[in-house]
Image (cartoon, helix red, strand yellow):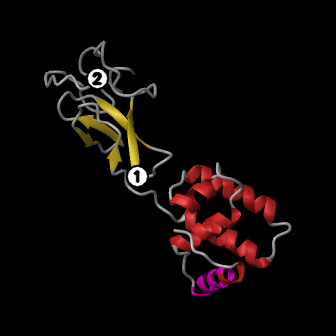
Amino acid sequence: MSLDLTTPQLNAIVRDTQDMGEELDTNVARTIAGYWHNGQGSAFYAFASSGHYDRDVLLRELSDAIAMAYATADADDRLQLDMLGTYFVNRELPPITHVWSSFGHRFISEDDGYESCLTCGAMYKLVRRTDDPTGGDYTAANGDDPMACTGDTGMIHGYAGEVDGEPHPDCNCLFCSV
């Protein structure tokens, strides 16, 4: 959650954090984002209010804020933006822990970043949701939702990069829609 701090209090925390060679605490980072957001539709606002963010959008927004503010900002403002930038650059994305639907498939993660159904062998990509960094959606090659699992263990899909037999006409997995 964002902290209820005055600007001098926030600046002191940021300077102390830098002096100790540490990274911003998440609550301090959210507070800085709340000070610098440019409206409710911004990535800074989303992060400040909920803690969720699209990393790429947020980094672009941060780059824009730095470009606009550096010329006129004082040392404390520049340090806030610098430390916020370090916070996000060093953040690894959290693991995807839930999906909207698996469409009846029983997925297992493959080494190449794809998800393969243990029942029918269909393969899809697990894509991180932009509105929830711990949520994901399974997608076909064309970006559509997967077809429902056939439950047919006799369907042959092979391994990544190879298709055994002909593609299945009613399957939109990454093997059959290549």
- Discs 2/1, front: 1
Q: Is residue 19 magenta?
A: yes
Q: Please tell me in which quadrant of the rendered image residue 29 appears.
A: bottom right
Amino acid marked by disc 2: Val
Quadrant occupied by the C terminus = top left
Q: Is residue 37 left or right of residue 101?
A: right
Q: Looking at the image, is 28 positioned above or below residue 49?
A: below
Q: Position of 118 compared to 173: left or right?
A: left
| Most foreground residue, 64 or 4 | 4
Residue that sits furthest to the front in the current view: 4
Which residue position holds label 2?
Answer: 163
Q: Is residue 23 shown in magenta?
A: no
Q: Residues within 10 Å of mark 1 (few under 14, many from 20)?
A: some
Q: Which mark is residue 29?
A: none
For label 1, the SS is: loop
The answer to which image quadrant residue 161 occupies is: top left
Mark 2: few/some/many CA within 10 Å (<14, 14-19, 20+): some
Residue at left offset 62%, top offset 86% = 16
Q: Is residue 72 above or below residue 123?
A: below
Distance from Cα at disc 2 to Cα at disc 1: 32 Å
The three-letter code of the residue at mark 1 reads Thr
x%, y% of residue 116? 27, 35
Report the span colored magenta: 10-20
Q: On the image, numbered disc 1 is attached to which residue? A: 134
